[in-house]
Amino acid sequence: MYVWIWRHLPGPTALRVVEALVLFLAVVALLFFVVFPWLEPYLPFDRVTAG
Amino acid sequence: MPRLLARGVGQTLITLGVVVLLFVVYEVYVTDLFSGRKQDAATAELDHEWSAGSSAPASGTASPSSAASAASSTAGAAGADVVTVTNPDKLVTDPGRRTRSYETSAGQGFAKLYIPVFGPDYVYTVIEGTDPDDLDVGPGHYADTQYPGEQGNFAVAGHRVSKGSPFNQLGQLSSCDALVVETAADWFVYRVLPMQDETAGWKASAHAHCAGVAAGSGPYRGVFGREITDPADYAQVLPVPHRDSTAVPRDAQRMITLTTCHPQFSDAQRMIIHGVLVRSYRKADGFLPPELQES
C-alpha cells in the first residue's frame, strides 16, 4: 500500500517526502479529531462516575 | 506471491501499532489540550457571570462587582496580589442560613474547587452534570445531588487520566486536607474525613487542621475519607453515603464526595473521597479563606 502511494505521488523525491508527510499528518488529524473521540466512550478506562 | 502477502501483513501490523501509539498520545496529551481549552472557557464564563454580580447578594460592604472581580482574579494564582481580610472570623457564616442564589444548567460551570495541598494553582471550575461531554470540561456535579454548603452530599466526578486529569491525585489526600468550594456568594471549606485505619481512637485535636472533623458515627459509621468501591455503588453520592435513600434527613451533615476511576488507567473500580463541611465564609472584597494557604 505504501509503495503504491509513493509511486503515485507526483514530483521529485524531495517534494514526495513533503507530500507523504502532509498525508501522514492528515491521517493523524483525522484520528485525533474524529476517530479517537468517537472511539473513547467504548473503552474501559474512562468512566469516573458511580452508579 | 507469499512475499507480497508477507509484506502486506507486515505493513498492516506496523500501521496498527502506530495507530495504537497515536491513541496513547491522544489520551495522555491531546485530550489535556482540548479539555484545558474548554475548562478555560468555562472558567472565563463563570468569572464573567460572577463579576456581572447578577447572583451576588447585597452584602452591604463593597460593591458586588468589585468583590467578585477580586475573587475571580485568584483563579490563576491564589494569594498573589490579593489583600487578605485581617479578621476572617467576621466573614464566617452559618451555612444553614445561606440559601443558594444561583441556578445551574447542564454543561455550565457554577462553582470552583480548590485543593490547597495540591498547590496554590489547583483550581477547577465545576460543571453541572456528569455526562462525558460535561466531564471533558472539568469535574462534574452529579445533578441530582445537593449543592455546595447544603445538607446532604455535594458529589462531583472527575477524570483521573486524560482530559486534564483533575482528580489524578485524589489518592494522595490525607484526612483533614481542605477541599474548598467557591460559589457565587460563598466559600465552603470541607475537610477529608478520617481514613479507615484512623477511625479507631480518632481525636480531632491530635491533628493539625482537624477541628470539626469527626469519625463517622450513627448513620455515618463506616463512611471514610477514602474508599475504593464497585462502579455501581451509587449510594456513595446519596445524601447520607452508603444509605440507599435520596431523602435528606433533618439532621444530615453537609458532605462533599469526589469520585474518580481506580486503579489509575483502569475503571474497574471507583475511588471515593468523602469530606465534611467545617467552615463557611461569605465572599468579600479581597478576601481569600485562610485555608487556601495550607499546603
Image: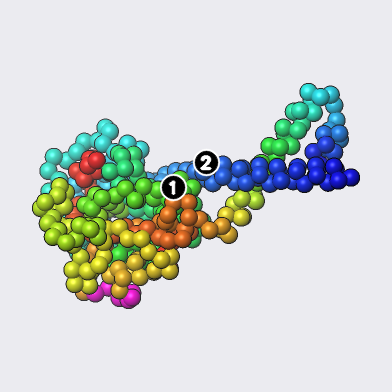
Q: Are marks 2 and 1 in contact (CB under 8 Å)?
A: no
Indicate the position of residue B63 as horizontal and vertical percent values: 25, 45
Q: Quadrant of residue A11?
A: top right
Q: Nearer the viewer, residue B232 or B154?
A: B232
Q: Residue at x 60, y 46 (%)?
A: B23
Residue at mark 2: chain = B
Residue extending farthest front: B2
> Mark 2 sits on what residue?
B29
| Residue drawn where x is 26% and y is 50% of the image | B174
Which label number is shown at residue B165?
A: 1
| In the rendered image, the vertical position of residue B205 relative to residue B143, given as above or below | above
Residue B247: say if magenta: yes
User: If you read the primary sequence from the N terminus, does the residue marked by circle 2 or circle 1 appear first?
Assistant: 2
Q: Is B131 drawn above or below residue B72 in the view shown?
A: below
Residue B278 appears in the picture as rendered: yes
Residues at marks 2 and 1 on the same chain = yes
Magenta segment, which residues? B244-249
Q: Is residue B87 above or below residue B237?
A: above
Left/right placement of residue A23 relative to residue B205 reads: right
Mark 1 neighbour class, 10 Å CA radius: few under 14, some 14 to 19, many 20 or more: many
Q: Is residue B24 magenta?
A: no
Residue B28: mark? none
Task: Depth check: give the residue in front, B9 or B70.
Answer: B9
In which quadrant of the rendered image does the C terminus of chain B lie? top left
B239 horizontally vs B208: left or right: right
Q: Position of residue B245 (x, y in %)?
A: 32, 76
Which amino acid does the dot numbered 2 rest on? Answer: Tyr
Q: Main secondary structure of the magenta part?
A: loop
Residue type highlighted by circle 1: Ser
Q: Secondary structure at mark 1?
A: loop
| Picture coordinates of residue B131, whole percent (x, y) | 49, 61
